[in-house]
Image (cartoon, rainbow, N blue to C red):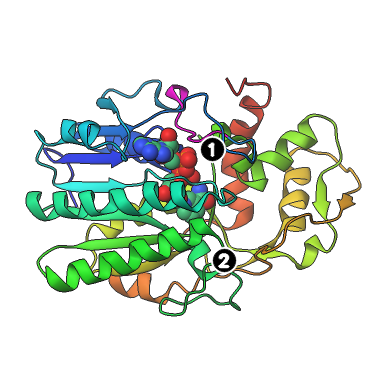
Amino acid sequence: MDFNNKTILITGGAGFIGSNLGFYFQENYPNSKIVIFDCFRSEKKFSNGNLVSFGHYKNLIGFKGDVICGNINNHKDLSLLESFKFDFIFHHAAISDTRVYDQEVVMQTNINSFYWFLEKSLKDNSTLVYASSAATYGSLPSPQRIGLESPENPYGFSKYMMDQIAESFYRKNPTIKIAGLRFFNVYGPREFFKAKTSSMVIQLGHQILDGQAPRLFYGSENILRDFIYIDDVIEANILACNTKFSGSFNIGTGEPRSFLDIANILQKELSTDFDIEYFKNPFSGYQMHTQADISLSTKAFNFRPKHSLESGIKLYINNIKEMHKASLD
Ligand SMILES: NC(=O)c1ccc[n+]([C@@H]2O[C@H](COP(=O)([O-])OP(=O)(O)OC[C@H]3O[C@@H](n4cnc5c(N)ncnc54)[C@H](O)[C@@H]3O)[C@@H](O)[C@H]2O)c1
């Protein structure tokens, strides 16, 4: 697909996945018009101590497209997008922190705003790709498949509802193309500003670079997750623009790996040999095993992830080192 001369909206474009997508278009389709819409981070925090939003200008240094600072909860801000006619909308803005329990604010931000983007896609005849999540599955047994969901936190429920709303919207408006991407655990460059909500790959990497033993929950060799490298996630966003049918799609590798595997691979890359330090998992409702069934994504848009945990971490390791003494401010 050629994105040159296309107008592309990326909401959440100052965040991890959105900023990588922005740079992907800039580098590969220099004649595309890219508009990033993000509220950026304020100093507001949730009661869990994490920032309300993680978008950071440092993720966008070198970005040459348009940037609009706006909140998806605010119709006046959204009206700034009215003058554009978008060919593609990538809707990634959301409260991405799975441990925000203020249901009102999660639903308002993640669900209410979605209706606006659906209507805008219909009006502009744009393809809509939006971020859903593996959190829609809660702790259902692996492999997680589209059609059987059981969210266990407000965040997971908000994404589940987005998928339901999208489905009724494209059934009513069959000309529109919508792909909801249920990302599993994504890791890679530009996730640093997610701080405590960034992947365990960078968090363990920085512990090791601090000269500390990697700290894991007891039984971490049995806690398996489907970790996917950012390049494969960007590829999924691109391929999904050409989906044969609208729907929700799992975006993972299909190969679950343990947190212990991450620590071991990082130690190998960083030439360290610390003994692992174990501690009790303080969380309830913790996903113990995720594994994306990606057969539908392969069928719809030929999604075939390229990276194993080993090759992803190898590509990422220099950036983990670069970000090691960076400031979170
Ligand atoms: N990273 C993952 O592992 C993962 C997994 C599953 C789903 N997702 C989803 O993918 C999308 C991108 O995730 P990410 O990891 O890049 O997270 P992120 O927090 O880095 O990016 C989200 C962006 O949305 C912006 N934002 C938040 N609230 C906003 C608001 N009210 N108005 C405007 N902008 C707002 C933030 O400033 C941030 O830049 C999110 O929808 C997230 O829920 C991510």
Q: Is mark 1 within 8 Å of ligand 1?
A: yes
> Would you place residue 201 above or below residue 150 in this image?
above
The C terminus is located in which quarter? top right
State which region is magenta: 51-58
Magenta span includes 56? yes
> Where residue 22 sits in the image (x, y, percent)?
32, 36
For badge 1, the amino acid type reads Glu
Is residue 239 something that shows in the picture?
Answer: yes
Query: For this rendering, which residue is in front, 272 or 134?
Result: 134
Is residue 31 something that shows in the picture?
Answer: no
The residue where tag 1 is placed is: 191
The residue where tag 2 is placed is: 152
Local crowd size for mark 1, using a 10 Å CA cut-off: few (<14), some (14–19), many (≥20): many
> Does 120 sit left or right of 307 as displayed?
left
Magenta span includes 323? no
Q: Earlier in the sequence, mark 2 or mark 1?
A: 2
Query: For this rendering, which residue is in front, 296 or 172?
Result: 172
For badge 2, the amino acid type reads Glu
Q: Residue at x 87, y 52 (%)?
A: 279
Q: Residue at x 11, y 68 (%)?
A: 173
